[in-house]
Amino acid sequence: MSTTFICHHCHGRHRKNPRLKTPQRYCSAKACQQARKNKWEREKLEKDPAYKAKRRKDKKKWYSQQPGDKYQSGYRETHALYCEENRVRQATRNSKSRLSPQPAKIVKTDTLTRESLTPEGLYILLPYENTDAKKIVKTDALIVQMLGSPEIAGYFLQDRG
């Protein structure tokens, strides 16, 4: 019988704990023990609806006692070194953006651009018809074909019978 085992998390070879009755799968390292606990938690939540309901109730109670607007100020108070390093990094990012011809936003507030993706003009929107395959269910209801100004006249002049 082997006196060692391979940890399922760190994949290192370790000496077995002789006091354990079941086969050992995780070593005593903090990260490996946390991985073992996380795995147990996931499996318990999947298999035990009563446990899942209790966890949900406990979390809801905890969140009701922790005001969300106080989280950031509390974090800054307890992590002064991180805040100072972040201020230095932000100053570096700001100086780089001032040097660039078009300064970038720190936070992207929207995905729309000021530049139009299509040129101005008259367009006609037509349902896109794929004649290669007939579908029972229409899955492309929002796909349209856009014809620009010069093509509009040609579209109306051709026989659509």
Image (spheres, helix red, strand yellow):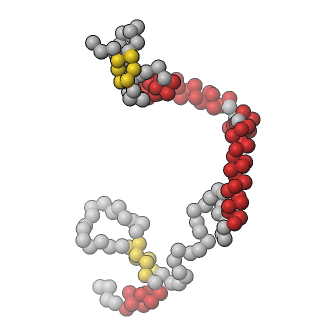
Can you give x and y, in whole percent of width and height, for residue 147 in the image? 43, 81
Q: Is residue 71 left or right of residue 116?
A: right
Q: Is residue 71 above or below residue 156?
A: above
Q: Is residue 129 left or right of residue 17?
A: left
Viewer-nearest residue: 53 or 20: 20
- Point 69% across, 46% down: residue: 86
Can you give x and y, in whole percent of width and height, for residue 159 in the image? 31, 89
State the residue lying farthest toward the top.
Answer: 19
- Point 38% across, 87% down: residue: 155
Determine which quarter of the picture holds residue 78. top right
Determine which quarter of the picture holds residue 8. top left
Can you give x and y, in whole percent of width and height, for residue 25 in the image? 37, 21
* Circle count: 0
Q: Is residue 81 above or below residue 157?
A: above
Quadrant where the C terminus sits is: bottom left
Viewer-nearest residue: 139 or 3: 3
Q: Is residue 153 visible?
A: yes
